[in-house]
Image (cartoon, rainbow, N blue to C red):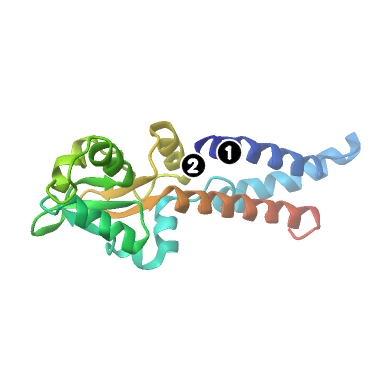
Amino acid sequence: MQGALRSFLSNGNIVKNAVLQHIRPMTPLMQPVMFSRFESVTASRMEEQGFESTTISDVLKAKGKSADGSWLWCTTEDSVYEAVKSMTHHNVGALVVVKPGAKEALAGIITERDYLRKIIVQGRSSKSTKVGDIMTEENELITVTLDTKVLRAMQLMTDNRIRHIPVVDGKGMIGMVSIGDVVRAVVSEHREELDRLNAYIQGGY
């Protein structure tokens, strides 16, 4: 999965450059006119809406309800069994962990990987082990903010081999995005950029 993401990012530039080849001038006499028109596009519309412009804020808005803090969570005192049961029921791979009685007080995150490595492999009981005993604690979490670029979030995920990343602001946690959310945003961004370039080629600008 992570190798495919790196390949996607690399190939994205190849695709972009291939498209740009179609709008390069064929003769020196055409060069001033063609590049003047293209530069005006990149300086305004494309810079504002184009390649690599999507932020985590955009991703949360696209997720809809998940952007308002209604993400799935458990507490440090819950059993690992209950946490995994919740993940299975909601078809997700991670839960935010909060302190008992304080939903906004982020304590950490528990993932399927934590369950496999710290419960199954070690032969521990999920029903007698608390979430707080196996979760990734808050001070070890890798997080992003609303202003973080999507490609930066993807880089953090691939470099650290994680699939979920909390979104925080100065007051605490405000949401969470997965590698799936990020990939969808990047694919959409590439598609929109190619559409803009195609519109330029066809005289849409």
Residue 148 % position (x, y): 40, 45
* Cβ atoms at labels 2 and 1 below 8 Å apart: yes
Report the side of 32 relative to 197 (left or right). right
The one nearer the camera, 198 or 7, is 7
Which residue is rendered at x = 17% and y = 45% of the image? Answer: 125
The quarter of the rendered structure image containing the C terminus is bottom right
Report the side of 105 relative to 109 (left or right). left
Residue 116 % position (x, y): 30, 41
Look at label 2 and name its amino acid: Leu
The numbered mark at residue 151 is 2
Report the side of 178 relative to 44 (left or right). left
Q: Which residue was labeled with disc 1?
A: 9
Q: CA distance from mark 2 to mark 1?
A: 9 Å
The one nearer the camera, 79 or 176, is 79
**Element at label 2:** helix
As drawn, 59 above or below 111: below
